[in-house]
Image: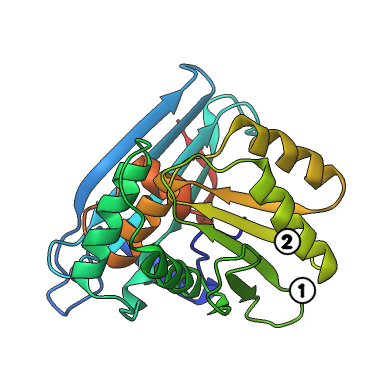
Amino acid sequence: MFWNYQVQIQTKPILETVFASRQCPCSKSRPRLRSADESRESDGRRFSEYVEVLTCAFCGWWFAFKDMWDCSCASVPDRALRTVQAGGAALATFSPALDQAQIGLLTREIEQHLLGRGSADEWATLEDASTAILREFGYEARGTARSKDGGVDIVVQHPDGGRAAIYAQIKHTRNKVGARVLRELIGTMSIHATHSGLLVTSSVFTAGVFRETEMAAQSGFFVELVDGARLLASLRLTYRTAAPTVAEILDVARPNLIILSGEFDV
Ligand SMILES: [Zn+2]
């Protein structure tokens, strides 16, 4: 998954401390983090999963964790295997590439596009925002020349430089994005001998896109789909215009660093 905040292993001690203390590391006074959203799932017997998002009222810093209990694989019946995964902390390093007014305009256009309405004046802003989000996710991203002839909008490099580039196509439109756009992207990917792509839209995809994405994966071309809802979640996280919800966190910043694992009494 490319469109997801990658937690660095160096941040693990910070995440462990925050999980234990529920305090923001932003200042000496260590302000207490507030719960922004939570969700709980359980089969009532063996398995339970709890996700919570916490934010700092002072700096906007946020923290998300997923706490999983599984009784089916512990060594004795009254004990459970517990795993806690966390993430999200270091987004505070984001360097603003766009001002709040631009973000506001773009956000409103995406909200309209999700309803199949609105104008598409902010397409250049969307390309800048997508580049900024990908950088925040830990990639080296650069926009290509702005021509409206389809093709590739952003070329994304892994920070280690070892793997082939990811090609990203950005569509700012109120219309549903269909399979033709996907085929264009895969065509460009195959010409450049790369097998990873991102298709980003401010609106939604047709059913045909999902079907053909699966078919393409079977032929070795992997395209990750980012629709307007995931885009909005990414914008809210990277620019912190609102406290993130559990759904948004799971869309773009899935907690993926294990900070606790072991057997515990139930
Ligand atoms: Zn703080």
Q: Quadrant of the C terminus?
A: top left
Identity of the residue furthest to the right in this view = 219
SS type, badge 1: loop
Dot 1, crowdedness within 10 Å: few (<14), some or many (≥20)?
some
SS type, badge 2: strand
Measured along the vertical axis of the image, is residue 193 above or below residue 47? below
Q: Quadrant of the N terminus?
A: bottom right
- Left or right: where 231 falls relative to 144: left
Q: How is the image coloured?
A: rainbow
- Left or right: where 213 falls relative to 25: right
Residue carrying label 1: 164
Measured along the vertical axis of the image, is residue 234 above or below residue 80? below
CA gap, disc 1 and disc 2:
8 Å
The x and y percentages for residue 204 are 48, 40
Specify the amino acid type for callout 2.
Answer: Ser
Label for residue 139? none
Specify the amino acid type for callout 1.
Answer: Ala
The x and y percentages for residue 68 are 49, 38
Q: Nearer the viewer, residue 77 or 109?
A: 109
Dot 2, crowdedness within 10 Å: few (<14), some or many (≥20)?
many
Residue found 17% across the figure and 71% down from its top? 30
Residue 244 showing in the rendered view: yes
Tag 1 near tag 2, CB within 8 Å: yes
Residue found 61% across the figure and 40% down from its top? 178
Measured along the vertical axis of the image, is residue 29 above or below residue 174? below
Residue found 30% across the figure and 79% down from its top? 96
**Quadrant in the rendering for residue 263:** top right
**Quadrant in the rendering for residue 193:** bottom right
Residue carrying label 2: 196
Q: Earlier in the sequence, mark 1 or mark 2?
A: 1
